[in-house]
Each structure stands twice: as C-alpha cells, then as structure tokens.
Image (cartoon, grey):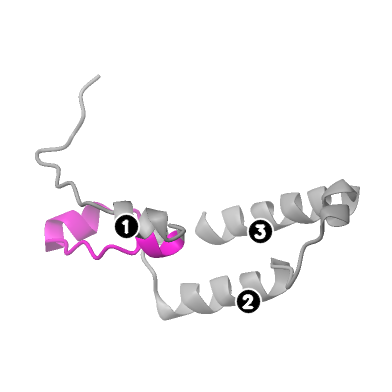
Amino acid sequence: PQIPLEEAHFIDIRQSMQNGGGPACLRLPAPLTEDEESSVNPNFLLTDTLLDKLTTWVENHYRDHLSPNDLQDPKLHKECQEALHELSSLLK
C-alpha cells in the first residue's frame, strides 16, 4: 500500500512516557500550511464550540472515582457504551 507521507519527523518522548505519558504526550503542536489544513477533516479541528461540547461530555461521563467493585458492575459497561456513542456523534 502507498503511504501519502512525504516526510516524517521523530521526536524522543521517552521521558514523557516514563512520567506516565497520556494525552499530554499527544499535544505536540503541528503547524500546517493552508493547503494541509484544508485537507484535515474539520470535525477534528478544535473550535470553541467543539471545546464546549467536549467539556460538557467530560463533565457528564467521567466519574470522579472508580473502585474495583465498579469494574464488576454491568452499569459501568453501559455507561461507557453510551459515552462512546455520544463522543462518536460529537466528532462525527
């Protein structure tokens, strides 16, 4: 298969990953040209409106704690499915 990449830049994130990694490791700014930006799916560009919707989504779906007993609760599975469905709808 062809890969439509002309160039790849590798960044050492070992230190970040050793400190727990997570979403902070993925917030690497990537400046785009106008042509590149126009080819990005607009549903994935963070706007004030999308940020507000995502903030509300997090407030509605993220638990402030999770215990081992919660992992046995079928309601948790249903909550996760509902959250994923709503997030998928937000991001189209």
Q: Are marks 3 and 1 in contact (CB under 8 Å)?
A: no
**Residue type at numbered disc 3:** Glu
| Residue bounds of the magenta highlight | 23-41
Label 3 and label 1: CA atoms lie apart by 34 Å
Q: Write the residue at 36% across / 64% down.
A: 45
- Residue 21 location in percent, x, y? 43, 57
Considering the numbered disc 1 on the image, is that residue within a helix, a strand or a loop? Answer: helix
Query: What amino acid is found at the position of numbered circle 1 in the picture?
Result: Gln
Q: In this orientation, which residue lies closer to the viewer: 14 or 3?
A: 14
Residue where numbered disc 3 is placed: 86
Residue 17 is a magenta residue: no
**Closer to the camera: disc 3 or disc 1?**
1
Q: Which residue is mark 2?
A: 56
Check disc 1: other Cα within 10 Å, few if <14, some if 14-19, many if 20+: few
Of the numbered discs 3 and 1, the one sitting upstream in the chain is 1
Residue 79 vs residue 87: left or right? right
